[in-house]
């Protein structure tokens, strides 16, 4: 019988695990639960605490405007706000349109990059 001891790495923010240290370090940098995250979609180092404050004081639509429509920044604020618990808000915030919004956001970003490079988009 053989046994093998392995090293496993875990995200300090969400608990996700992996076997490769560089992969987990990359994940931690963009993790929705990381208060110091860098958004991989809009590449913004935005203040997550400020985003949470906008969400809790003004609501989801105001947050979407505040983060310039970036669904990943919106989701990060929603997740972190919900983790803080009900003592800060009346009910958990739901962001059910994330998958649709991120697809639309990426398609629009791809279109803009294609136009800037002189390429045509398949949907054009």
Image: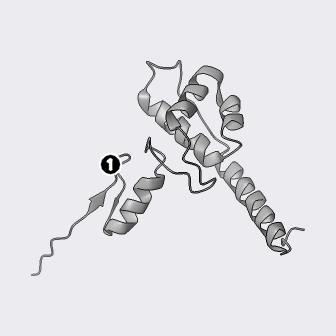
Q: Residue furthest left?
A: 1
Residue at horizontal 67%, vertical 35%? Answer: 66
Image-quadrant location for residue 5 = bottom left
Q: Is residue 22 above or below residue 58?
A: below
Q: Position of residue 31 (x, y in %)?
A: 46, 51
Q: The C terminus lies in which quarter of the figure?
A: bottom right
Looking at the image, residue 83 sits to the left or right of residue 104; the answer is: left
**In this figure, what is the number of numbered marks?**
1
Q: Which residue position is annotated with label 1?
A: 12
Nearest the viewer among 107 and 96 is: 107
Q: The N terminus lies in which quarter of the figure?
A: bottom left
Residue at horizontal 75%, vertical 65%? Answer: 110
Q: Is residue 107 above or below residue 45?
A: below
Looking at the image, residue 55 sits to the left or right of residue 111; the answer is: left
Residue at horizontal 30%, vertical 68%? Answer: 19
Image-quadrant location for residue 113 = bottom right
Q: Position of residue 3 (x, y in %)?
A: 12, 76
């Amino acid at each position: 019988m053989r046994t093998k001891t392995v090293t496993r790495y875990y995200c300090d923010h969400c608990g996700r695990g992996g076997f490769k240290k560089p992969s987990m370090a990359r994940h931690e940098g963009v993790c929705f639960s990381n208060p110091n995250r860098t958004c991989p979609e809009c590449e913004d180092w935005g203040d997550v605490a400020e985003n949470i404050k906008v969400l809790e004081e003004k609501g989801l639509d105001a947050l979407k405007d505040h983060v310039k429509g970036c669904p990943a920044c919106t989701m990060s604020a929603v997740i972190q706000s919900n983790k803080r618990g009900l003592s800060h808000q009346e009910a958990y915030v739901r962001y059910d349109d994330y998958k649709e919004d991120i697809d639309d956001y990426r398609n629009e970003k791809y279109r803009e990059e294609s136009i800037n490079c002189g390429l045509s988009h398949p949907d054009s």
